[in-house]
Every structure is written in C-alpha cells, then in structure tokens.
C-alpha cells in the first residue's frame, strides 16, 4: 500500500509549517534579543568592576607611597589619608584642607 499526500493535505502541511517557522523565528528573535541584552549588561558590569578595581589599586598604592599620599584620587575625587599622622603632614604641606 502506497501512502501519498493529496493536494489539500499539502496545503495544510505547508500552512502549518509556515506557522511553525514564523513562531520559531519570533521565539528565537526574542531569545537572541534577551541574550544580547544580557551579554551587554554583563560586559558593562565587568568593565565597571575592572575600572573600579584599578581605581582602588591606584588609591592603595598612592596611600602606601609617602610622596603621593596627599595626592590620592578616586575617580577624580580627592581622598584624604585615613592615618592621622599622614593627614596632619598633608595639612601642614597645604595639600589637604584642614578640618
């Protein structure tokens, strides 16, 4: 026995295939858009983390170096030394405003 499709079945299968392909395309487009958005957000977070870590490292190294202790900045904002002796020396040198 040979099974074959007739013309009405071909039209229905073709229409069904078109609907499935369009729905899969829309679903994939939505998933790809969400995935791209997630990747972009993740990249931005990683870049910000690296930049903040570098700024933190600069402040730490500046505070450790006695010559740069009074000139430490974090994203352009002047950071005063937390050590009272260093703060007093910076105030006397005129590099940090007195409280």
Image (spheres, grey):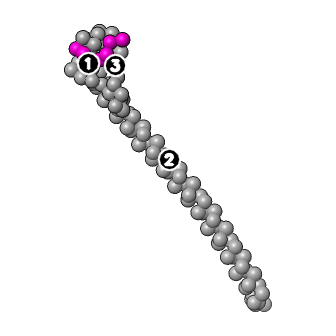
Residue occupied by mark 2: 41
Assign a secondary structure to mark 1.
loop
Q: Residues within 10 Å of mark 2 (few under 14, many from 20)?
A: few
**Please, is residue 74 above or below residue 30 in the view?**
above
Q: Relative to 66, is 46 on the left or the right? A: right
Front residue of 51/9: it is: 51
User: Which segment did they paint magenta?
Assistant: 93-99
Indicate whether 84 appears above or below 5: above
Nearer to the camera, 40 or 17: 40
Residue at left offset 21%, top offset 20%: 67
Q: Quadrant of residue 83?
A: top left
Q: Pointer 3: what residue?
A: 80
Does residue 31 show up magenta in the picture?
A: no
Mark 3 vs mark 2, CA separation in Å = 33 Å
Q: What whole-number distance in Å separates the C-alpha atoms at marks 3 and 1?
A: 10 Å
* Quarter-of-image position of residue 11: bottom right
């Amino acid at each position: 026995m040979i099974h074959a499709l007739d013309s009405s079945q071909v039209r229905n299968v073709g229409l069904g295939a078109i609907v499935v392909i369009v729905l899969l395309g829309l679903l994939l487009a939505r998933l790809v858009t969400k995935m791209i958005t997630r990747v972009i957000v993740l990249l931005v977070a990683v870049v910000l983390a690296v930049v903040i870590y570098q700024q933190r490292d600069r402040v730490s190294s500046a505070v450790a170096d006695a010559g740069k202790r009074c000139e430490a900045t974090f994203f352009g904002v002047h950071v005063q030394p937390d050590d009272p002796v260093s703060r007093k020396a910076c105030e006397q040198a005129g590099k940090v405003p007195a409280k």
